[in-house]
Amino acid sequence: IKLIIKRFVKNYENIDNIDVREEYAVLSGVLGIINNLLLFFIKLIIGLVINSIAVISDAFNNLSDLGTSIVTIFGAKLSNMPPDKEHPYGHGRFEYVASLVVSFIIFAVGLQLLRSSFNKILNPEEVMFNWVSIIILLASISIKLWMFSYNKYIGELINSSISRAIAYDSLNDVLSTSAVVLGTVIGNFVSFPIDGILGLIISIVIIYTAFTIAKDSVHLILGPAPDPQIVE
């Protein structure tokens, strides 16, 4: 990620500059769109081939992550607008609003996957085991680990709440995809609907992540007390 930053972010070392901060956020969003779009199509095809609701659920989770990447870009652009008559202190809190929108997107997807998983538990179907699919899913986990890593790095570097939120959402994706892989392997040896159960767990993780992000975003929008060092 440091090599990519040096290539695409001008004056990347000047992180106090608002235009440089915007470039960091836009870069994070563009990388997120590319990676999540790739993961969505790969997992959707695999899920349809092996008839797994957990894999398909994971695919649409990645599609929601694509939406959050788009929100990241718009949030960065809007928060960088200069002060005006109505907003003399600037528009920096647009970033917190963007984080809140991200939480709504994640929450909506989580609810939809919850419904699909319940249906799969009540009407189970056989999951086809395929080693090629397992290997591809494991490769997708490595991509999500990298996404967690670079979003966390950018979030800490420019002190961005939305980048940190997306980082931990990526980490949740790592856990959920790992659960999918485990469920696909176990489903080859057991008769109960492990696929639907794991899909249910994934959806709960997604909804919890949405709640956490929303809670943090509202806290920042309301305006917490400044750091004692700043006051001093």
Image (cartoon, helix red, strand yellow):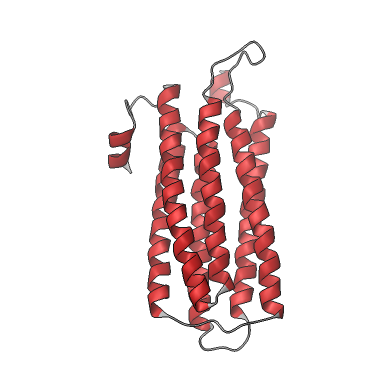
Q: Is residue 183 left or right of residue 224?
A: left
Residue 61: quarter of image: bottom right
205 w.r.t. 96: above or below: below
Please tell me whether residue 38 is drawn above or below residue 222 in the rendered image.
below
* Residue 195 percent location from the top left of the image: 59, 77
Q: Position of residue 161 (x, y in %)?
A: 54, 37
Residue 63: x, y in percent? Answer: 54, 55
The number of numbered badges drawn on the structure is 0
Would you identify the image quadrant in which residue 134 lies?
bottom left
Residue drawn at x 51%, y 24% as measured from the top left: 80
Who's the residue at 51% across and 63% down the image?
175
Quadrant placement of the C terminus: top right
Screen quadrant of the N terminus:
top left
- Vertical side of 84 occupied by 136: above or below: below
Query: Position of 112 compared to 12: left or right?
Result: right
Residue ID at (66%, 76%): 120
Q: What residue is shown at x 64% (from left), y 10% (from top)?
A: 85
* Residue furthest to the top: 85
Above or below, comparing residue 23 to residue 62 in the picture: above
Residue 156: % across, % down: 45, 38
Residue 3 visible here: yes
Left or right: where 148 falls relative to 2: right
Q: Is residue 212 visible?
A: no
